[in-house]
Amino acid sequence: MPKIIQGKFRILDNRKVGRGYFRMAIAAPRIAKAARPGQFVLLRCSNGPEPLLRRPFSFHRLRKNSFELLYKVVGRGTNLLSKKKKADTIDVLGPLGNGFNLRSPAILVAGGMGVAPLVALAEQLADRKQILVFIGARTKQEVLCRQDFKRLGLKVHIATDDGSLGYKGLVTGLLKKILLRTTNYELRTTIYACGPKPMLKELSQIGRRSGMTTYGSLEENMACGVGACLGCAVSTTSGYKKVCSDGPVFNLQEINWEQ
Ligand SMILES: Cc1cc2nc3c(=O)[nH]c(=O)nc-3n(C[C@H](O)[C@H](O)[C@H](O)COP(=O)(O)OP(=O)(O)OC[C@H]3O[C@@H](n4cnc5c(N)ncnc54)[C@H](O)[C@@H]3O)c2cc1C
Ligand code: FES
């Protein structure tokens, strides 16, 4: 098992990138070097005792000596994170979990905040001509990272629930529409996804019907983050698995979605 590092690291930047969205860069050469897309870190959000539990965040970008996180303020911990300043230190534990394998051709599907780890994945996938990106969000203002994918030369399809940008409807609806009219996608294409559970469930069905393997990063509330407390168990075709240490990336066709 790769070494898990814990320590206080320097914040290089922490800036607002949208309504309620922040991007934080942390200088941590040993963590950045060991990390793979799809893995995550646990952060202590304050220097005091509260909140007690560390919060999990996926690697958004991996650099030689640093990594970036993209996060949305949803509660106490993320609100405290958003107040951190450049040159503050932050307590980090990671890299944790098992990340994405790197296969192309690939289709990347992001739902909302789920776009965060898919940027790190896109940066490391070879043969970018064979990668399609789908981003789904509630509304135009919540479509994140479109330019990051475009800068990598990737074709990006957008869906918004309210139709304010791109296709009107769910990102899975757009994916189905494009797959139906595309004849050149291949069975060896891998779908990689991160987003809300209903989206991942539907992608597992799309993958099954089309013969494409579908990997997704699952989110569960976490306590220990290292496989010790069983707080993040999910039911799979081969028994219960821990999202923090067996995942967070799973073959979605192996998840028992009804439990
Ligand atoms: C492996 C993993 C990777 C993640 N990566 C990212 C990321 O890259 N960017 C990002 O913004 N968030 C990510 N999350 C979710 C993030 O951990 C939570 O948003 C955060 O812990 C909330 O902390 P809080 O104290 O601000 O909110 P809390 O006060 O703890 O909760 C506020 C609200 O957020 C909900 N919530 C809390 N934790 C989660 C969770 N794990 N999943 C879904 N909803 C949650 C609660 O149910 C509640 O409604 C990830 C979660 C996991 C498990
Ligand atoms: S959070 Fe403790 S086992 Fe996963």
Image (cartoon, rainbow, N blue to C red):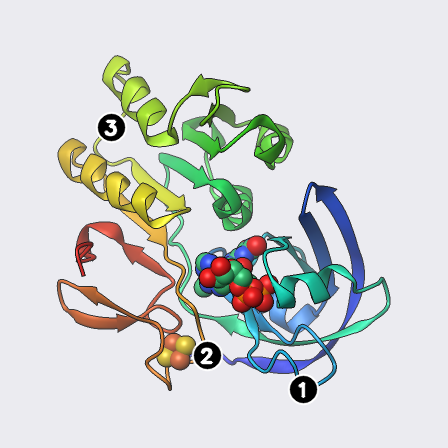
- The reply, left or right, for residue 221 in relation to residue 21 is left
Residue type at mark 1 is: Pro
Residue at the (16%, 36%) spot, across then down:
211
Residue type at mark 2 is: Ala
Residue occupied by mark 2: 223
What is the distance, in whole Å, between disc 3 and disc 1 at their CAs?
A: 51 Å
- The reply, left or right, for residue 136 in relation to residue 227 is right
- Image coords of residue 117 (percent x, y): 51, 51
Q: Is mark 2 within 8 Å of ligand 2?
A: yes
Residue at the (24%, 36%) spot, across then down:
188
What is the distance, in whole Å, between disc 1 and disc 2 at their CAs?
A: 15 Å
Provide the secondary structure element on which disc 3 rests: loop
> In the image, which is nearer the foreground, mark 1 or mark 2?
1
Picture disc at residue 186 = 3
Provide the secondary structure element on which disc 2 rests: loop
Residue type at mark 3 is: Glu
Q: Badge 2: how crowded within 10 Å, few (<14), some, or many (20+)?
A: some
- The reply, left or right, for residue 154 in relation to residue 73 is left
| Above or below, comparing residue 231 to residue 150 in the picture | below
- Give the quadrant of residue 248: bottom left
- Image coords of residue 85 (percent x, y): 84, 63
Residue occupied by mark 1: 49
- Give the quadrant of residue 207: top left
Q: Is mark 3 within 8 Å of ligand 1?
A: no
Q: Badge 3: how crowded within 10 Å, few (<14), some, or many (20+)?
A: few
The quarter of the picture where the C terminus appears is bottom left
> In the image, which is nearer the foreground, mark 3 or mark 1?
1
The quarter of the picture where the N terminus appears is bottom left
